[in-house]
Image (spheres, rainbow, N blue to C red):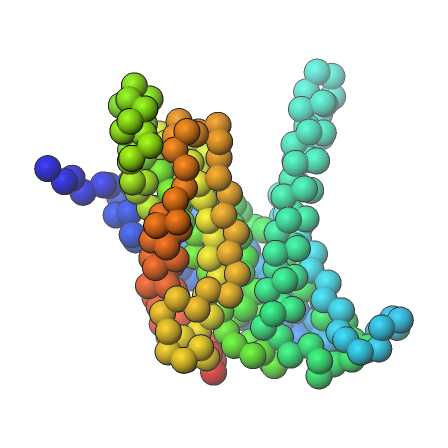
């Protein structure tokens, strides 16, 4: 008998958290946006493209900087090593987010129109409660539109978590573990990403282009990042191609609500 899965915050497995957005709050920048999903919130500011001295005159350089509004407090004694490790991990994660966002900007912005220029993007993480990469991508897109930067298309991003709710039973049966189909959770929280309560074993962020710019298709995935966790309770269970196709299909349907939300907020999408 199939059961309906209810998450800790009361959402169904295919429900997104409440979304909020503000644009043009930072007047000192060419464009800015404040965007949140649930408790996860980012502030993105865009400057440029502006003229800059550089060797390559044929292209525009993209610079993405990721910072946190609240920093890890320093500590002494025995806790100092732990704090240093946390700071290094945060810098590494911020660098990965910056590289991902840079690739998105290079894919959607018409950089060839601005040779010998630089496009600066500042991303400030106000609070992280899961799905940070998707939230940062959505905030980035809104800031680019607010700045009037010419783009080939507009994008929206969603985060999906592949998990199993009966990890204990699957630990006792290797046959069930191999043949099990993971449950997909849309827009996971930080607790769902890090906790073994749902036995998470893969998390993916999918950036989908506006269907109107790709022939009206529903699965116009521009970029994706999938991380499989071998140390989870489903470590022996591989993520099959069918599972990835299911994630892509759900992402294509989920971004429709984001594009509708952007339109309702008077953010131009064409």
Q: How many marks?
A: 0
Q: Is residue 241 left or right of residue 40?
A: left
Q: Residue at x 28, y 22 (%)?
A: 173
Q: Quadrant of residue 70?
A: top right
- Residue at the limit of the structure toward the left, as seen here: 1
* Residue 10: % across, % down: 26, 44
- Residue at 36%, 48% in the rendered image: 243
Residue 174 higher or lower than 134, as above or below: above
| Residue farthest to the top, as pictured | 78
One can see residue 49 in this view: yes
In depth, the one of 112 and 22 nearer the eye is: 112
Describe residue 60's horizontal placement relative to residue 203 as left or right: right
Q: Is residue 113 left or right of residue 104?
A: right
Residue 41 visible, this angle: no
Q: Provide residue 174's location: percent of width, then percent of height.
A: 32, 24
Indicate whether 237 appears above or below 265: above
Give 228 or 192, whichever is nearer the viewer.
228
260 vs 200, nearest the viewer: 200
| Residue 3 placement (x, y as % from top left) | 16, 39
Q: Residue at x 74, y 17 (%)?
A: 77
Q: Position of residue 76 (x, y in %)?
A: 74, 21
Depth check: give the residue in front, 99 or 26. Answer: 99
The reply, left or right, for residue 216 in relation to residue 175 is right
Quadrant occupied by the N terminus: top left
Could you tell me which residue is drawn at 72 percent across and 70 percent down?
119
């Amino acid at each position: 008998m199939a059961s309906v899965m209810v998450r800790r915050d009361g959402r169904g497995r295919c429900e997104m958290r409440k979304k909020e957005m503000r644009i043009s709050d930072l007047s000192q920048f060419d464009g800015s946006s404040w965007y949140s999903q649930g408790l996860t919130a980012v502030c993105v500011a865009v400057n440029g493209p502006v003229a800059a001295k550089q060797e390559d005159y044929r292209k525009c350089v993209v610079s993405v900087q990721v910072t946190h509004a609240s920093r890890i407090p320093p500590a002494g004694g025995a806790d100092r090593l732990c704090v240093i490790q946390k700071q290094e991990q945060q810098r590494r994660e911020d660098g990965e987010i910056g590289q991902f966002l840079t690739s998105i900007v290079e894919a959607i912005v018409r950089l060839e129109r601005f040779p010998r220029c630089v496009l600066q993007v500042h991303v400030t993480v106000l609070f992280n409660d899961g799905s940070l990469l998707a939230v940062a991508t959505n905030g980035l897109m809104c800031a680019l539109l607010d700045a009037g930067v010419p783009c080939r298309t507009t994008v929206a991003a969603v985060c999906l978590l592949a998990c199993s709710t009966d990890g204990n039973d699957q630990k006792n049966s290797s046959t069930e573990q191999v043949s099990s189909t993971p449950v997909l959770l849309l827009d996971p929280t930080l607790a769902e990403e890090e906790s073994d309560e749902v036995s998470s074993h893969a998390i993916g962020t999918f950036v989908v282009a506006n269907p109107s710019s790709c022939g009206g298709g529903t699965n116009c995935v521009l970029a994706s990042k999938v991380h499989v966790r071998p140390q989870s309770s489903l470590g022996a269970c591989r993520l099959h191609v069918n599972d990835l196709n299911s994630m892509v299909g759900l992402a294509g349907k989920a971004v429709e609500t984001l594009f509708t939300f952007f339109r309702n907020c008077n953010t131009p999408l064409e």
